[in-house]
Image (cartoon, grey):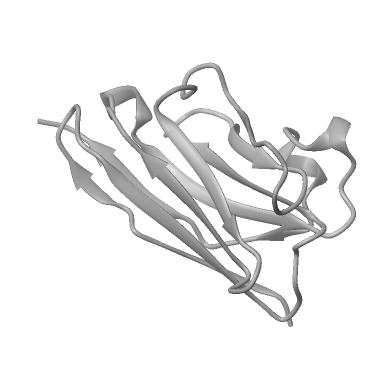
């Protein structure tokens, strides 16, 4: 059984930082797509950062480019997201997603991923 478990969310002041982690079990995703998506209240789930395979250059949403960094650890089957210079508009539930056979053109489409974590809340507020 495949499981994705996120951790690291919390409450942080504007300008602060957080590090989210996603641990995968049940299968490896070193050659598959993994990514982070978020969903704010009343909004659709949106792409934040994705990676086609471990070691590939990640893709970022324009709203987080230069502030967030996605990394993958092939040996540990984990993925992380470093969130810096956080803004109130970054407040959302952040989800980890993975798919072993996703194609590049579908990486930013949340509907294309087979596996999802339960989500972790990130709140940016003073």
Residue at coordinates 71% horizontally, 56% vertically from top-left?
A: 98
Determine if residue 45 is in view.
no
Q: Give the image quarter of residue 49.
A: top right
Q: Is residue 23 left or right of residue 30?
A: left
Percent across and percent down for residue 2 are 71, 76
Q: Is residue 95 left or right of residue 40?
A: right
Q: Give the image quarter of residue 85.
A: top left
Determine if residue 58 is in view.
yes
How many numbered marks have been drawn onto this rendered protein structure?
0
Residue at coordinates 36% horizontally, 30% vertically from top-left?
A: 90
Image quadrant containing the N terminus: bottom right
Percent across and percent down for residue 125 are 17, 32
- Viewer-closest of 101 and 120: 101
Q: Is residue 62 left or right of residue 3?
A: left
- Viewer-closest of 112 and 23: 23
Residue at coordinates 40% horizontally, 53% vertically from top-left?
A: 20
Percent across and percent down for residue 7 are 40, 63
Residue at coordinates 9% horizontally, 30% vertically from top-left?
A: 126
């Amino acid at each position: 059984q495949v499981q994705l478990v996120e951790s690291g969310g919390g409450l942080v002041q504007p300008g602060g930082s957080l590090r989210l982690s996603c641990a995968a079990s049940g299968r490896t995703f070193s050659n598959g797509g993994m990514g982070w998506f978020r969903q704010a209240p009343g909004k659709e789930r949106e792409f934040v950062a994705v990676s086609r395979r471990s070691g590939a250059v990640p893709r970022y949403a324009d709203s987080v480019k230069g502030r967030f960094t996605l990394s993958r650890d092939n040996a540990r089957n984990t993925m992380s997201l470093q969130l810096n210079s956080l803004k109130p508009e970054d407040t959302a539930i952040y989800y980890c997603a993975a798919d072993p056979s996703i194609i590049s053109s579908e990486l930013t489409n949340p509907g294309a991923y087979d596996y999802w974590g339960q989500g972790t809340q990130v709140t940016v507020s003073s």
